[in-house]
Amino acid sequence: MVSLDGSLSKIENRESTRAVVRYARVSAHKARPVLNQIRNKSVSRADEILAFSERSVSEIISGCLNSAVANANNNNGIPQEELFISECFADEGPTLKRFRPRARGRATSIFKRSCHLTVVVSRYSEEELEVFQTRAELRDERKNLQSETKSEEETKSKNKKAKPSKEESVEEDVIVDDSEGEESVEEDVIVDDSEGEESVEEDVIGDDSDNDVENDEQNEKEAN
């Protein structure tokens, strides 16, 4: 475990600030697992971990972390983006002893423990900051490429949807033209058939009348 003096930050020659919460009404045994999760993490990442942690100690630790970041901003002028948690630990504090009555006149002891929480925040080195900047630039480029590809796909899909509509309109025009042509042809055929039948009937009727006249003349001759 790292001592309270912050020997790690002194060895690495880093600018560091700290914040301490004393007499926190939580046992050190419960606080240490949460501190292990945020150690050597950036401040933004540590805030996310503490915000979604299910342990009640996370609220106290987040307050200690915020105070350490505020000390770094005010005292050393270091922005939050350049800070990470270099050290964090929990020391045992005084224990309050209480008693609870039990059966047969007995009394059981209750130990209400406390701890001292310490969070040390240090500044990243220049090399590490350059690496983080290059990573951020790469992420931005990837996001831009993804957005461009999505926009191109959307335009292509819209064009594909627009083309079938034109084809459907052409098909409708063709269907209408075919229907009109068929109707005109049917009307013409019907008219022609009716005229032909009438002419045939008239010719047949005329022939029958001539035959009747000739028969009458023959009959008259035979009678005479």
Image: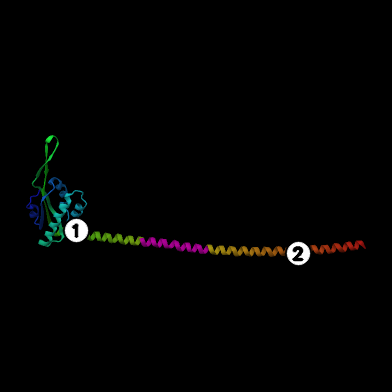
Res. 123 in view: no
Pinpoint residue 70: horizontal percent, then vertical percent. 13, 59
Identify the disc placed on residue 65. none
Q: Nearer the viewer, residue 104 or 170?
A: 104
Pinpoint residue 91: horizontal percent, then vertical percent. 9, 48
Q: Residues within 10 Å of mark 2 (few under 14, many from 20)?
A: few
Identity of the residue drawn at 11% across and 38% down: 107
Res. 58 in view: yes
Pinpoint residue 54: horizontal percent, then vertical percent. 21, 49
**Magenta extent:** 154-174
Label 1, on which residue? 132
Q: Amino acid at mark 1?
A: Phe
Pinpoint residue 204: horizontal percent, then vertical percent. 76, 62
Query: In the rendered view of the protein, which quadrant contains the C terminus?
Result: bottom right
Main secondary structure of the magenta stretch: helix
Relative to 221, is 76 on the left or the right? Answer: left
Residue 165 in the magenta stretch? The answer is yes
Label 2, on which residue? 203
